[in-house]
């Protein structure tokens, strides 16, 4: 619930084998509708159609090879054109919901933002939107992964969460209090506490996998120049730190990350844990977390 006392919630969709389920005929019809015709249309048509595949099974005793079958669904992956064609395929998805609600499309990471000041209308809107989305999925021959599609009701500590179910026919969405979306862990209070916790864990694991944790950094610190140590810092810590910092950087929980950053800086310059590192940030030309 926001300052206008709107109920706000999100439906986070999970596509079932999204790129593999794109129907070629439907995609070509949409391209034609969008004005892609003649030469480029024929190029895309030839790119998609007349592809064949077969299955080969090998074991100790024998080898089995199936007959070749034509591939009529899916966009070839591994190329730039694949995601582009998928985005064109789902480009009309926002038209399936009303203008009072918002949809966020990022390839196959799709979410719906629903808002309404009246709790019962908010629930009805959520159920209607889910129905319209499912109808679009059916018309476009794509399946929704119901087990991984979740609903989250954003709220505050002052206004408790209204408990109700989001249902389509006999299927009910799982209601969660946190979810990972585009690399960020969202929680229903937007406190970013769980994201900070996940960040700290990921940072420790990343350093451990690359054998560049605090202890290893202490070992290489006398052997490398500051420029080399800065390369290690920017490669294995800073690249993780800056992702999404515009959202969670000012939260009180971010102090956990700032302490980790100061610890690495102290190791890089070879000072004790309790020594001030303000001047060393300037010397290394590294921005502290609060200044990112």
Image (tube, rainbow, N blue to C red):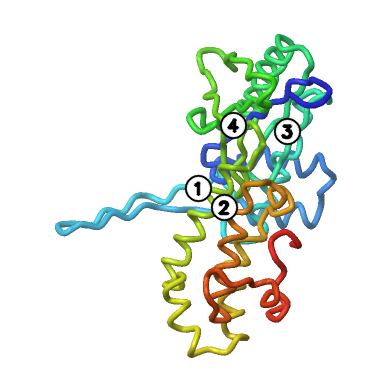
Foreground: disc 2 or disc 3 = 3
How far apart marks 4 and 2 lie (CA) works out to 20 Å
Please report the residue visible at 55 percent of the width from the left and 78 percent of the height from the top: 271
Reading the image, the residue beneath label 4 is: 141
Circle 3/circle 4 CB separation < 8 Å: no
Q: Quadrant of residue 3?
A: top right
Reading the image, the residue beneath label 3 is: 93
Q: State which tag comes first along the sequence, 4 or 1.
A: 1
Q: State which tag comes first along the sequence, 3 or 1.
A: 1
Foreground: disc 3 or disc 4 = 3
Q: State which tag comes first along the sequence, 2 or 3.
A: 2
Question: Looking at the image, is 1 positioned above or below residue 239?
Answer: above
261 vs 60, left or right, is right
Q: x%, y% of residue 269?
A: 58, 81
Question: Looking at the image, is 91 positioned above or below residue 95?
Answer: below
Reading the image, the residue beneath label 2 is: 50
In the picture, the disc for residue 56 is none
Q: x%, y% of residue 183?
A: 60, 50
Please report the residue visible at 69 percent of the width from the left and 54 percent of the height from the top: 245
Please report the residue visible at 45 percent of the width from the left and 47 percent of the height from the top: 69
How far apart marks 4 and 1 lie (CA) works out to 18 Å
Circle 2/circle 1 CB separation < 8 Å: yes
Q: State which tag comes first along the sequence, 3 or 4.
A: 3
How far apart marks 3 and 1 lie (CA) works out to 28 Å
Q: State which tag comes first along the sequence, 4 or 2.
A: 2
Reading the image, the residue beneath label 1 is: 70
Q: Nearer the viewer, residue 146 or 5?
A: 5
Foreground: disc 4 or disc 2 = 4
């Amino acid at each position: 619930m926001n300052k206008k006392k709107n109920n706000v919630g999100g439906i986070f969709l999970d596509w079932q084998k999204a790129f593999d389920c794109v129907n070629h005929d439907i995609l070509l019809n949409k391209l034609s509708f969008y004005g892609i015709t003649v030469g480029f249309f024929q190029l895309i048509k030839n790119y998609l159609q007349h592809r064949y595949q077969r299955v080969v099974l090998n074991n100790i005793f024998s080898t089995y090879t199936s007959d070749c079958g034509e591939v009529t669904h899916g966009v070839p992956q591994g190329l730039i054109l694949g995601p582009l064609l998928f985005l064109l395929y789902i480009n009309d998805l926002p038209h399936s919901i009303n203008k009072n609600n918002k949809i966020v499309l990022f390839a196959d990471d799709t979410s719906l933002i629903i808002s309404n000041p009246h709790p019962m209308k908010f629930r009805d809107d959520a159920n209607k939107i889910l129905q319209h989305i499912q109808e679009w999925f059916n018309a476009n021959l794509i399946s929704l992964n119901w087990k991984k599609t979740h609903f989250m009701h954003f709220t505050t500590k002052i206004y408790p969460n209204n408990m109700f179910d989001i249902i389509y026919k006999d299927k009910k969405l799982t209601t969660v209090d946190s979810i990972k979306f585009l690399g960020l862990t969202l929680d229903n209070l937007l406190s970013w506490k769980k994201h900070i916790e996940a960040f700290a864990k990921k940072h420790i694991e990343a350093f451990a996998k690359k054998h560049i944790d605090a202890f290893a950094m202490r070992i290489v610190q006398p052997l490398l120049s500051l420029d080399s140590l800065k390369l290690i810092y920017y490669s294995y810590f800073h690249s993780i730190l800056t992702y999404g910092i515009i959202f969670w950087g000012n939260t009180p929980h971010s102090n956990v990350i700032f302490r980790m950053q100061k610890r690495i800086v102290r190791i890089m310059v070879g000072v004790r844990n309790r020594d001030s590192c303000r001047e060393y940030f300037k010397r290394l030309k590294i921005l502290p977390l609060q200044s990112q």
